[in-house]
Image: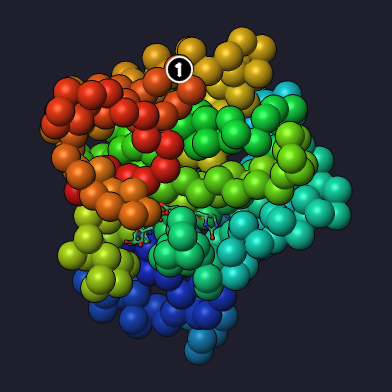
Amino acid sequence: MTSTRYRLLELLNTNGNNYISGQKLSEELNISRSAIWKHMKDLEKDGYVIEGVRRKGYRIVQSPDKVSENTIRWGLGTDWLGKNVIHKEVADSTQSVAHKEALHGAPHGTVIVADEQTKGKGRMNRQWHSASNKGIWMSIILRPNMNPGSAPQLTLMTAVAIAEALSEIISVKPKIKWPNDILIHHKKTAGILTEMQAEQDCIKYVVIGIGINVNQTEADFPSELKNFKATSIRLETDVYFHVKDIIQKILLRLEQVYDAYMQTDFTHIKTKWEHYGYKIGEDIRIKTLRHSFNATFLGIAADGALLAQMENNETKKIYSGEIEW
Ligand code: BT5
């Protein structure tokens, strides 16, 4: 797609359901009204349905990239993951929608996806910024037959699926920052939030939340995140991606790694995780709930814990916390 046509699409997309006048488009793109008309016709050939109304302007009423229950399911290629898709234009958090659905009996593999979240959340009630139509804001309901104590392994498994899916479409190798961040060029592109409902020794359900910054530009991030190491796939690769395509790739990979994990054990996830692991073999600073300390990152243990070599040479397993930037 030519860059003018891409910019035209961006302008139309940003306006959502509102009309944008031909005059405004021609000023923004610095091309004539008839050139715009020609680009519109080409977009329609690509599958966009654009409505033009006299004195109001233009808007996209249907787009081939649009995320919906149908577009996600068409051509997905999974056996069980994403057979039940719930799409919301706006959700407070797809996590809370997922919990409600799970409590009402939603099946294993249900996917909830929103174009925008108004109260996206990270771990420990941190905020997750979820700009409208710029990224993947998705939660997956799983009902694994496993011990609640092993649930953190599902975060590592999901990180592997995301890293593998991204590796298929970008030329940079993504890195996984223990336990739940996906980095491109050492900057945070995605985060995972795993929550569960469990009884003493059995999991009732797990909700895996996946947030991926896909098409944000610098201007789409709030100022507090600009100082933080947040980025999008587009910012790092200069390529615009269809959100729907990435969702499908991730679901397919996730189903594959999940099935393999359930049929065998965590070992093969550990190997794959370490392939993408950020700062393995390096000195890191680890932050746990109570304190921070320096250590050498040896890799992950057979149960998914971070293996830290302490300053006194003792090896310690860390089950919760994070690597400081
Ligand atoms: C995470 O938490 O990284 C988990 C993020 C999970 C988000 C998904 S979106 C779908 C589902 N529905 C939800 O409501 N949540 C899940 P954590 O490691 O705690 O990181 C949170 C921190 O990352 C914040 O305190 C910010 O510093 C930073 N942050 C917030 N929004 C960001 C963004 N869009 N991109 C990069 N960093 C961000």
Residue 253, picture quadrant:
top right
Of residues 212 and 279, the one nearer the viewer is 279
Q: Count all numbered tags in the image, as a single digit.
A: 1
Residue 33's spot in the image, x, y percent? 34, 73
Q: Residue at x 22, y 60 (%)?
A: 228
Residue nearer the viewer, 136 or 31: 136
Residue 149 at x, y = what percent? Answer: 60, 34
Q: Is mark 1 within 8 Å of ligand 1?
A: no
Q: Which amino acid, by three-letter code, is at mark 1? A: Ala
Front one among 17 and 98:
98
Q: Quadrant of the N terminus?
A: top left
Q: Is residue 111 visible?
A: no
294 vs 24: above or below: above
Residue 85 at x, y percent in the picture: 72, 47
At 50% across and 80% down in the image, what residue appears? 19
Image position of 111 with respect to 29: above or below: above
Residue at image position (45%, 26%) is 304
Query: Measured from the top left, where is residue 94 in percent x and y?
Result: 61, 59
The residue wearing badge 1 is: 302
Q: Residue furthest right?
A: 105
**Secondary element type, mark 1:** loop
